[in-house]
Amino acid sequence: MILAAGRGERMRPLTDTLPKPLLRVGNKALIEYHLESLARAGFADIVINHAHLGHMIEAALGKGDRYGVNIHYSSEPAALETAGGIAQALPLLRHERENRGGRPFLAVNADIYCEIDFSLLLPVLRHMQTSPDGDLAHLVLVDNPRHHAEGDFTLDSGRVALSGKNNLTFSGIGIYQPKLFADMVPGSVAKLAPLLRQAISSGKVSGQHYQGVWIDVGTPERLRLIDSQLSTKHRQSLAHP
């Protein structure tokens, strides 16, 4: 699932007329990098939730044919926050032959740029699928960016804790069991952080530290930074094929 329903207030006025996931960096829209990376990793069915100017996302991406994936959309009249959006989209994330519980799934924030190889998360997905009573979530953590120096969680031997040494930042990439959202009412507004903290407190969250390229594209300044870096990389690839 690609989480694309945010309003992008800090990106205004750019997001007044264009949803944040369609802002261009390098030579394509932010969300297109995710679609291409997920397709390379073998993900075939992708759910995208949207709210603000969501019709533009559907018009731009279509059914996903040109990316090699099948896209399903979960429309929100108003943004439901991360947990609320996931809870509403759960029926789309289940295979038609599955029972109500469903399988674990990967979720990615649309407003980040990340060069992670998503195939590295497939063994975690498989393990969580065969161990439904185990972890409720698996989080990809990154080094703390300057704008979030305090971090979010700590990581010790593959387990996520609320506090400890060497705090890291949640990347916006995670794998979740549907039961993490079992108590939520579809259509309700809810943040993800409280659910994660509760699961972490119960010892039900694993994690890994990703140390590659990751940028939270949350401001016009950061957008220009990654746009400049990707444009340079693109020119270099053309000069040295």
Image (cartoon, rainbow, N blue to C red):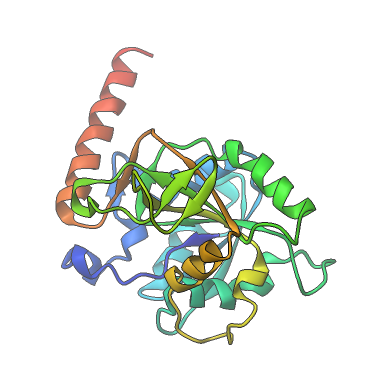
Image coordinates of residue 37 in percent, x first then y, are: 51, 40
Residue at far right of view: 97
Q: Which quadrant of the rendered structure holds the N terminus? A: bottom right
Total of numbered circles in the picture? Answer: 0
Q: Nearer the viewer, residue 206 or 162?
A: 162
User: Front-most of 218 and 22?
Assistant: 218
Q: Is residue 176 left or right of residue 13?
A: right
* Furthest residue in direction top, as rendered: 240
| Residue placed most toward the observer, 189 or 51 | 189
Query: Residue 220: which quarter of the image?
Result: bottom left
Q: Position of residue 12 (x, y in %)?
A: 18, 67
Where the C terminus falls, by quadrant? top left
Residue at x 19%, y 52% (from the top left corner):
147
Residue 55: in sight, yes or no? no
Residue at 34%, 48% (x, y): give it.
167
On the question of residue 87 being in view, the answer is yes
Locate residue 52: give its quadrant: bottom left
In the picture, measured across the screen, residue 158 lies left or right of residue 60, that is right
The location of residue 11, given as percent across then percent down, is: 20, 63
Decide if residue 201 is on the left or right side of residue 162. Answer: right
Q: Is residue 25 left or right of residue 89?
A: left
Q: Which residue is pictured at 25% across the width and 46% down the height? A: 145
